[in-house]
Image (tube, rainbow, N blue to C red):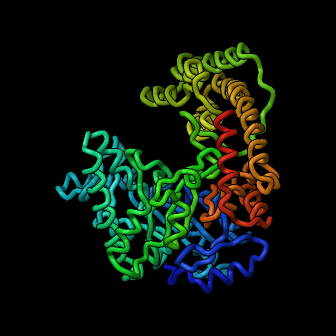
Amino acid sequence: MITGAATPEGTEAFGQKHANTAFRRLGKTDLTVSQAGFGCYRVAAGERVHERALLRAFAKGINLVDTSTNYADGESEKLVGGVLESGVTEGVLQRENVVVVSKVGYLQGANYQLSQERKRRGEPFPELVEYAQGLEHCIHPTFLEDQLTRSLQRLGLETVDVYLLHNPEYYLGRTKKDGMAAQEARREYHRRIRDAFAHLETEADRGRIRWYGVSSNTFVEGPDHAEFTSLDALVHLAEDLRKDHRFGVIQLPMNLMEPGAVLEANQPGDRSVLQRAADSGLGVLVNRPLNAIRGKGLFRLAEVEASEAGEPEDVVQAIQALAKSESALSHRILPELTVPSGLQLRIKNQLSVGEYLKHYWRGLETYERFRQLRDGVMMPRVQGVMDFLEGYRAESPALAAWMEKHPHRLDAALSGVGAMYAADAARDIRFVRHAVSEADADWAAADNLSQRALRAVRSTAGVTSVLVGMRREVYVDDVAAELARPISAGDRVNAWRRLSEAVNRG
């Protein structure tokens, strides 16, 4: 276990060592943090590319890491802990240099199974929000204590620097579905958060955390939104608990297409959530800077390498060829192998990319949706089947021939579909890139759209650090290049308003 915690002196010394990287004070915590943090949503222990990326981030002067109990089912925290341990052991890092943020609230994967086991024993977590199949939520002190213990073990740390309640508004979403009166739901919502804050104060007293706060997607919504989380109300809850409370950090979404943190006057006195946070000396972490929710889909605020899209008829033919290849394996080749029938059915289901695309390829909405489906679902399943079939290649010349040809058919179909969506995405990106440049001359100085997206957010008064997914070293370098360019912080309200109007017109 690594003892100690981030300190104002240690983080300031780290900032001075990395003079080419932009830093800022994390509100009342007095910790000095890089203006971009390493977001750990899609990283996991054992992935060497992720480990190298985090090590490179530290080397480039990025000293804030944001993870959560549910990211990669706990493997994200393990990755952070492992990299920190190696850095400290090798003497390239000191614990007091690095600010570790983790979050708590979700019950998925192993936590969900834990919850079901406790229910079977007649000991369910109190005040559990049963949101959907495979997904629950909880911020009761009993759950918080259990989860913090597990987080510290996975991280290998004595202390988490900042511990955030992770999207507590799930409670309001559940009560809306159940038809509870809005005023009653909000009273109970605040009561639950107050109890959570009270417990987190005891954890701070114990030294297991230093600061706590809330990560909420609805900090930026209007007051009439059913799941709106009022920062003003949370500040008063903390102040009522104790004068020297440790409520010090919030996290919220903000990007080029979702400027609510700046433009939504949802706090008393017609102030924004960023202004209210500044009033109370809170550090503000921004998530989703490159992933905008637009309409029904996700829009990635980064450059797209778009190849020339083919004709729709050519795409259909490529998909049909892929589906025919899948059918040949299932109906002609597999029955001749010594593969158990149950496994044959599983292979057929795992390999049904062509069949899926035949029905749905036109309805994927955005390039980002297609990319996630391709990289996160289709390709891993196909690769798993190909790895399995490798053991049977020698017993079947037909299988060997199929394994040579099928990857080319898969690539043709996915490339054809991807090019159609990438062409649309590239047009949208050119439009957004131009709109950003027109909105603020300072923002136009960045090299590419992802850097402009980061620059726009970090140059806005009230934002402390922007959490960016940097799973690869090339992403780290892109962020580091932007942090090396000086830019002053201002309210930028007019720029955000100009950008918002342009995007809405477009």
What is the residue that sits farthest to the left in this orientation? 122
In the image: residue 195, left or right of residue 438: left
360, 182: nearer the viewer: 182
How far from the left and from the top, in percent, is residue 59?
A: 72, 71
Of residues 346 and 69, the one drawn nearer to the viewer in this rendering: 69
x 60%, y 65%: residue:
462
Q: Is residue 418 above or below residue 223?
A: above
Left/right of residue 146 with respect to residue 425 in the rendered view: left
The reply to whether residue 441 is in sight is yes
Q: Nearer the viewer, residue 503 or 355?
A: 503
Q: Position of residue 370 (x, y in %)?
A: 62, 33
Residue 35 position by quadrant = bottom right
- Residue most toward the front? 269
Counting the numbered discs, the total is 0
Q: Residue 338's spot in the image, x, y percent?
A: 50, 28
Q: Is residue 43 left or right of residue 301?
A: left
Please name the residue shown 52% across and 59% down the image.
271
Classify residue 342 by image quadrant.
Answer: top left
Q: Quadrant of residue 103?
A: bottom left
Q: Is residue 333 visible?
A: no
Image x and y of residue 99, in percent = 57, 73
Q: Measuring 66% from the left and 40% from the top, which residue is drawn there?
A: 501
Against 141, is 309 above or below?
A: above
User: Quarter of the image containing the C terminus?
Assistant: top right
Which residue is drawn at the image coordinates 56% and 22% (left, top)?
360
